[in-house]
Amino acid sequence: MKASYRSSFGSAPPQSGQPNATHLPLAGITVVSLEQAIAAPFCTRQLADLGALVIKVERPKIGDFARNYDTRVNGMASHFVWTNRSKESLALDLKSSDDLAILMKLLEKADILVQNLVPGATDRLGLSYEKLHMKHPSLIVCNISGYGQDGPYRDKKAYDLLIQSEAGMLSVTGTPAEPAKVGISIADIAAGMYAYTNILSALLQRNKTNQGCKIDISMLESMVEWMSFPMYYTFNNAPGPKPTGASHATIYPYGSFETGDGGSVMLGIQNEREWTSFCIQVLENKDLVNDTRFMNNTLRSQHRDALKKIICDSFADSTAPEVIARLDRASIANATVNHMQGVWNHPQLLARGRWINIDTPEGQIPALLPPGCADGHGARMDAVPAVGEHNKAILAELGL
């Protein structure tokens, strides 16, 4: 059943099926978020996981546009249910002076303001860090944008694909024939993670100084940080790594190899000891160990086409599970080439009890416990809200 309680400001609501969540690290912290899409909602959902009261400010009726990305989860959007559990929805029209006044009153009780509106939008609303700091010196303000709050790219639109492209990600993914973006919103996720960790650091700093601060998170800078290996690989104008699909640009064998049942397995060889074991125990070809084409990783990378044929020929009479069993016996790193249904039913996740049911406006759905959470008592796992679901209760607490 959907919980009927609502928290008071300054105290976190209980987890589903538990009397309270006051033991969680961010219990007592109130976050107000002017958020949409992925980056800011992913950041604040993680704050909610730790017990913070997150009030999501949305457009009346329509809400966060990510609510309408698709209808795959009982009529709800897959992105939205992932990034918005355990939050309270307050529907406000910030172009209305009355609704803006409600937000201002709400910020009097807030510890953190997170926003990922277009750069300059909050300044025009009178919500710049400088103005807010004068009234609320302990307030932490986190701005998330595509390129940052200043600079020549400030006002460029910044969808995930575009940031991946600007950050060089597309130069190292895909194949030599065609670049490919990462199949998830990795630039948004990177920005959300850096916003989350910076906010936690700001809370620790505030405990020492009683002062809030301004955090400026750029999707581009977050993504470029993750691209540091290929950047250093090209140090002093050295040529960059070539896109190699699911393989590795500099290590071989490393990637996907076809098996006789029409499937494939992922495997990786990291050193010469593993290469020897792979040749003798998996390929059953001890002569390959001393083949001059494959004596070290550099040579194996240079002759990867010839080596791939040898490996796939060896796997041609075996199924993917049989090959994985051989790799496991030889202690060679490997993985199943999984699809999403395989992940839903992954035996490791099931054995570790990583799934828990949460409420939504359209019934219960499974949700993955946050990484690091030992059990259902270590994180807040509450409902995904409907648009404006908490207006009445929040306004009542504000005396409106």
Image (cartoon, rainbow, N blue to C red):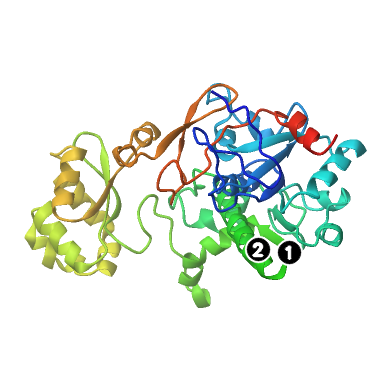
Q: Quadrant of residue 276?
A: bottom left
Question: Is residue 212 positioned above or below 329 on the image?
Answer: below
In this picture, residue 195 sits left or right of residue 115: left
- The outermost residue toward the bottom is 236
Disc 1: CA contacts within 10 A as few (<14), some (14-19) or many (>=20):
many
Question: Is residue 56 positioned above or below 136 on the image?
Answer: above
Closest to the observer, 90 or 288? 90
Instruction: Give the x, y percent position of residue 225.
Output: 55, 64
Q: Secondary structure at mark 1?
A: loop
Instruction: Give the x, y percent position of residue 201.
Output: 61, 64
Q: Which mark is residue 7?
A: none
Residue beneath the point at 12% across and 64% down: 289
Q: Which mark is residue 202?
A: 2
Which is more N-terminal, label 2 or label 1? 2
Q: Is residue 289 visible?
A: yes
Three-letter amino acid code at the position of disc 2? Ala
Residue beneath the point at 53% across and 25% down: 72
Instruction: Compute the Cα span from label 1 to label 2.
Output: 7 Å
Instruction: Give the x, y percent position of residue 32.
Output: 72, 46
Rendered-image quadrant of the C terminus: top right
Residue beneath the point at 57% across and 27% down: 360
Closest to the observer, 147 or 285? 147
Q: Secondary structure at mark 2?
A: helix
Circles 1 and 2: CB atoms closer than 8 Å: yes
Residue placed under numbered mark 1 in the picture: 213
